[in-house]
Image: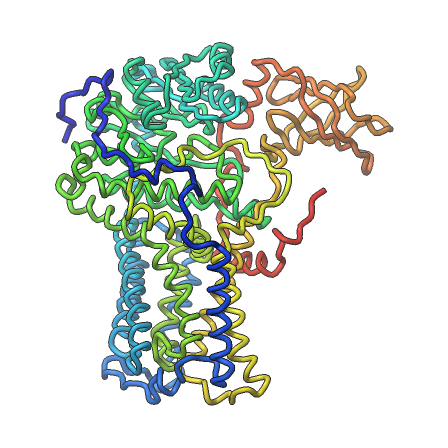
Amino acid sequence: MRLISKPAQLSQPIDPIRPAPPPALSQKPGAAQQHISPWVWRLFIASVLLWFGVLLTTAWRPVLVPPEIGNPAILPPLPSFLQVPEELERLWLPTIIVLGLCIVLRWIKPTNPTRLVVRGVMAFVAIRYLVWRSLVTLNVSHWLSITLSLVFFANEIVWISSYLLYFLQSTWTTEKRRRMEADRYSQAVLAGDYLPWVDVFIPSYKEPDFIVRRTAIGCQAMDYPNKTIYILDDTRRPNIKALAEELGCKYITRPDNKHAKAGNLNNALPQTDGELITIMDADFVPFRHFLTRVVGFFQNSEIDLVQTPQHFYNPDYHARNLGLDSFLPNDMEHFFGFVQPGRDSGNCVICCGTSYVVRRSSVEAIGGYYTRCCVEDYQTSIRLLTAGGRLIYLNEVLSMGESTRTFVDFIDQRLRWLQGNLQVYFCGDELPIWSKLNWVQKSYHVTLILFCFNPVVRLISLVTPLLSFYLGPSPLVASVEQYAYYAIPFMLLYNVSFTWATDYRLSAFWNEVYETAFCFPALGRLSLVLKQPFAKASTATRKGVKEESKNYNFHLTWPLLVLIGLTIVGLFLHYGGYWLGVWPHQQYEYEGKGFLVFWMLYNLLVMGAAVLAGIDQPVRRVVDRFPIETLCKVTIEGQPYWGQTHELSETGASITLKTCPNYPLRKGCAVLVEFLEQGFSVEAEVLRSRSNDHCLALSLQFTNLSLEQNRQLVDCLYGDMTWWKQRKQPGIFDSLLAMLSAVLHFRPVMKKYD
């Protein structure tokens, strides 16, 4: 169906009437009156902990409710169809079959048919597990037992149900079909038969000049003739205006920042007239063939928007902080490389704010970019879909951008996305999801709602074993044989198939680290949004961050540190008491105790990785250097020497000279570097030099760069896909071992800097 609504007059953008915010929102953070002093709260918490400790020690037991009261003395009988085999080989047969399948998957490529088969097996194993859990494992011995058991079981039902729904939505993807379409459609563009005018918008808000310059140069370098580059400066900076004039770009600004990025884009719409619009955020650089691959789709009049993946040239915060930046993929790989192609199958692609092309008439038909929420992209795509639009996803990396460099920025960005996603469901009058979309599209929104409340699921998973250890009742009761027959096959296949199905874009283990790190900040934002959906949020993620020292971020990770401490104390209360002879070992053992201990230790590992990843290491180089090896000639005092680069950036390079002078070069020595394969040269000065095995290693800083040299460097570094930009694909157990190593080595804490 085509968009049939009449285009709105964009000179008067639609601005939904909203009630004025309550007075509390206008106050500065921390300005609200405190009724109870912080020291009173600390004294209260310390008193509760002291009382709890005295109660445990005086009662001479490590739990509040004795295990013989909180747990059944005899396990409930299993129904006949759930009977566990007595023979050892039959008992472990499901685990052996699943393990064999997991091993074979290493040699099977995840495609639509193979995913369908494997996920069919996974669905059967998950339902088998749920039937067992629901019929015989609930603990009804005590009111605390019932409460703990039901809460945990409900949590599992929500988790597994959302996972099975995610199965259905991501099994069949459009990745191969869209690439074939791009090959076909691009022929008309390459032949010059279809060249509609494209306005390239670069929305900018407080980004440093060099970042905006890089993006503008990259946009100008795209191999497409009919385009105009616009820098949309939302901070009215004279230096950005001068930059636009220097580069030959158009410059658009406005007198205020109303509605943030959405307002900035809407301000540019009536001042431009291209048939198509490309949005390229100020920290993203398109490849040369970006428009060539995307524009051709619009020969199909039914298509309104084409989204491409976001890919990043620097590691995200957790890989960098843990020292695994050459090993772990970015956390967004899963969404852009796997979830979006699945959503494309049901015409529910999410517009992601950058690296997409949209038909101008389609945006005008819905009254411009949506302004009511704290982000504009997802909401605008919903408005297009509810108006009958068609959004597609081309899963080709055609641009690269800057990932968040610090844990603080990661949390701030994801909290803004979380709030924007939830705000959609408070805008039913303008975003009629439940009345306008079909049932398949609605199912994707059910999944998103469940995903938004995933921090609650994660919290219950973290605290349930602790509550069981301190209170006494087990959340589930089962024998070791039952765990081996029902639980182990399910958990093993879940972890392996999740990672395999995404083509190793995201490990299930690392997914839990992300969820754990985000859990407590997200719970705070969830409570705020439920009370005040349109409370003020941050407007943009910091770019070009530079930090001289570590930042431990205790204000974000202290809840995890508390849980880690309670876990260690809980284990000591139990097993330390056994070792010290305070209580007899056999008195407090019960079926399922070993499972709880394993669960607590696993949570301890995940929480440890999350806390360590949240320790930001210094960011002293805001311009990234990339591992580019290319032949070069370095002229020193009129004498040429040949070598190759090892690292290259827009501002400098690391070079090894094979033929070199017999003396180290002094700092500040002027040299001329000629890049032989790229055909240009730059002036530089020596920062450091070191002689080694008849070679000379140089660290150089470029000087007196001309605009043309800057263009050459940006094109060399960002203009195309090269080997070091390819996504990383760690194995399943490699990821688990990396997480274990990161926790045991304490690298974020132990690493020292000059």
Taking 173 as reference, is 750 left or right?
Answer: right
Establish if 340 lies above or below 447: above
Q: Is residue 611 above or below residue 660?
A: below
Taking the spot 28% from the left edge, 48% from the top edge, the residue there is: 530
Residue 394 position within the rendered picture, expressed as x and y whole percent measured from the top left: 33, 34
Which residue is rendered at x = 72% and y = 18% of the image?
672
Q: Answer above or below: position of 451 versus 385.
A: below
Horizontal side of residue 7 vs 144, given as left or right: left
Please state which of residues 202 and 426 is positioned toward the viewer in this rendering.
Answer: 426
**Residue 312 in sight here:** yes
Q: Residue 288: name its quadrant.
A: top left
Instruction: Name the residue at the right extreme.
Output: 662
* Image position, residue 516 (x, y; %): 44, 56
Residue occupying the point 33% across, 72% down: 148
Please state the total of marks drawn on the protein image. 0
The answer to whether residue 137 of the structure is visible from this angle is no
Task: Residue 576: name its quadrant.
Answer: bottom right
Q: Quadrant of the N terminus?
A: top left
Which quarter of the figure is the C terminus placed in? top right
Query: Residue 311: x percent and y percent?
Result: 45, 36
Q: How is the image coloured?
A: rainbow
Q: Percent position (x, y) of residue 505?
A: 43, 48
